[in-house]
Image (cartoon, helix red, strand yellow):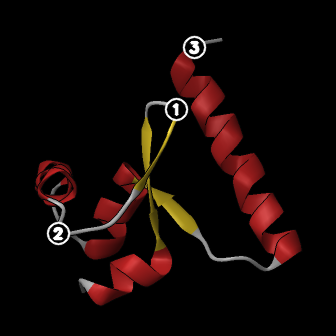
Amino acid sequence: MTRKDKNKILSELMKEVHKILGTERWYTAHEAAKYMRINYRTLLNRLHSGKIKHKMIGYEYRISQTELKKHL
């Protein structure tokens, strides 16, 4: 099983946990770029410059839905 497969499984599990707990949705960088309708590299530039607050989980960026809505 590749890292990409593991991350996809983890992402699906996290979605289910969020549904059960009713907590805020957290997006991966790719999901966030699609949500904001911007290029993935543009999003990474904004994350690295500190314009968008984020968390690192392992090697992946996670951005809250609230934070994304601020920058739409």
The residue shown at (60%, 25%) is 5
x then y, percent, for residue 33: 29, 61
Residue to which mark 2 is pinned:
51
Q: Given the image, on which type of amino acid does mark 1 rest?
A: Gly
Specify whether 45 is left or right of 65: left
Which is closer to the viewer, label 3 or label 1?
1
For residue 72, which quarter of the picture?
A: bottom left
Q: CA distance from mark 3 to mark 1?
A: 15 Å
Q: Which of the two labelled residues, at mark 2 and mark 1, occupies the earlier sequence position?
A: 2
Task: Identify the residue at horizontal 88%, vertical 71% (top origin).
Answer: 20
Q: Is 15 left, or right, of 62 in this rendering?
A: right
The amino acid at mark 3 is: Thr
Q: Secondary structure at mark 2?
A: loop
Q: Amino acid at mark 2?
A: Lys
Task: From the image, tell me which residue sits under label 1.
Answer: 58
Residue 2 — which label? 3
